[in-house]
Image (cartoon, rainbow, N blue to C red):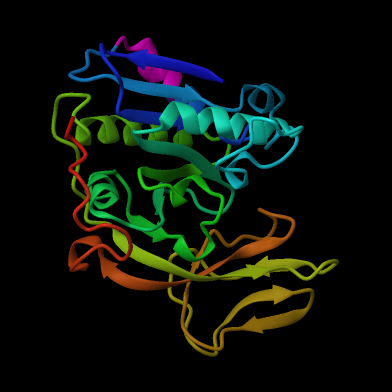
């Protein structure tokens, strides 16, 4: 694990890339940011997490790092030990994880147990959608009180690196690390209601589009030659033909623009401001 610190003092802000080794955009965006020799107003950590998997271009070495939190320093699984080290590094920090996907080309943010601290950050990221993964967050980084993620775009693409870099800059401006005003796009807010799993041995074809409404009775996928029809309306998230061996994607409910939410859906609405020292 590489840990780069910019600025003087004890960082309370962190960026984490390469949680999955086959998603290099975060590591590349961190490299670009550091190469610019940034002048910062407060310290921050920039972390390249799973170096062995990144070097090999694979998701993980032994087990999924983003399903292994908070980790175990005594484990015989590399990512479980790494998860413990990562949690030690980001303890006390508001943190942004950078990921990428095969199912959607535009950046969007992932949260869980939304509190005021997370909401303030996610409102200033250059994304069109924010997805609440609380119902499936167990063991993932977004479950932590000060952690949120961005899916920066298509896995392995140059655009994902560009999007990741823009998200890092906006995040560091929002948290007072960099000078300047971050964007305020007022993204749409979606709550995941359930995962959809594949039946072993069957071929899935997604016929819809992520973040676009599927109406009741609408055919949104094929399983082999059989149509898959919605029993009620939902909005697909991370749904794709072959993005995952077991998971087809997620159903979600659209709640409206983030600004329309009267209070955080989960967590402590009185959490401290992201720029507080």
> In which quarter of the view is residue 41 placed?
top left
Provide the major secondary structure of the magenta segment: helix
Where, by quadrant of the figure, is residue 54 drawn?
top right
For the residue pair 163 and 22, the one nearer the viewer reads as 22
Please name the residue shown 34% across and 33% down the image.
93
**Quarter occupied by the N terminus:** top right
Q: Residue at x 33, y 63 (%)?
A: 266
Q: In the picture provided, is 186 more to the left or to the right than 144? A: left
Quadrant of the image containing the C terminus: top left
Q: How many marks?
A: 0
Decide: is 183 above or below 38: below
Q: Residue visible at 18% across and 35% down? A: 275
Q: For residue 57: magenta?
A: no
Q: Is residue 40 left or right of residue 98?
A: left
Residue 148, horizontal then vertical, whole percent: 39, 45
Q: Residue 3: give x, y in percent of width and height.
A: 47, 18
Q: In the rendered structure, does residue 34 fall within the stretch colored magenta? A: yes
State the image coordinates of residue 146 (x, y, percent, origin top left). Answer: 35, 43
Q: Please determine whether, in this image, residue 232 is positioned above or below residue 6.
A: below
The reply, left or right, for residue 95 in relation to residue 98 is: left
Q: Residue at x 29, y 49 (%)?
A: 118
- Foreground: 84 or 112? 84
Seen in the image, is 87 located left or right of residue 77?
A: left
The x and y percentages for residue 254 are: 36, 72
Q: Is residue 37 above or below residue 202?
A: above
Is residue 78 visible from the viewing direction of this image?
A: yes
Q: Which residues are magenta?
A: 30-37
Taking the image as drawn, is residue 24 in sight? no
- Residue at the farthest right position: 201
């Amino acid at each position: 694990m590489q840990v780069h610190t910019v600025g003087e003092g004890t960082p309370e802000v962190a960026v984490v890339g390469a949680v999955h080794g086959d998603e290099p955009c975060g590591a590349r965006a961190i490299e670009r940011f550091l190469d610019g020799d940034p002048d910062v107003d407060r310290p921050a950590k920039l972390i390249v997490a799973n170096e062995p998997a990144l070097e090999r271009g694979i998701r993980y070495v032994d087990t999924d790092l983003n399903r292994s939190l908070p980790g175990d320093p005594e484990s015989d699984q590399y990512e479980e030990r790494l998860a413990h080290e990562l949690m030690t590094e980001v303890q006390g920090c508001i943190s942004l994880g950078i990921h990428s996907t095969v199912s959607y080309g535009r950046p969007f943010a992932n949260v869980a147990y939304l509190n005021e601290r997370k909401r303030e950050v996610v409102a200033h990221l250059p994304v069109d959608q924010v997805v609440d993964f609380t119902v499936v967050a167990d063991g993932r980084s977004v479950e932590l009180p000060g952690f949120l993620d961005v899916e920066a775009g298509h896995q392995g693409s140059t655009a994902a690196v560009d999007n990741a870099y823009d998200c890092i800059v906006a995040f560091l401006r929002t948290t007072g690390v960099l000078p300047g005003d971050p964007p305020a796009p007022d993204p749409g807010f979606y709550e995941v209601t359930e995962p959809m799993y594949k039946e072993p041995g069957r071929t899935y074809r997604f016929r819809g589009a992520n973040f676009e409404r599927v109406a009741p009775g609408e055919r949104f996928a094929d399983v082999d030659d059989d149509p898959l029809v919605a029993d009620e309306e939902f909005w697909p998230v991370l749904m794709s033909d072959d993005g995952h061996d077991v998971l087809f994607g997620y159903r979600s409910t659209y709640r409206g623009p983030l600004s329309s939410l009267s209070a955080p859906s989960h967590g402590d609405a009185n959490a401290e401001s992201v720029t507080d020292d």
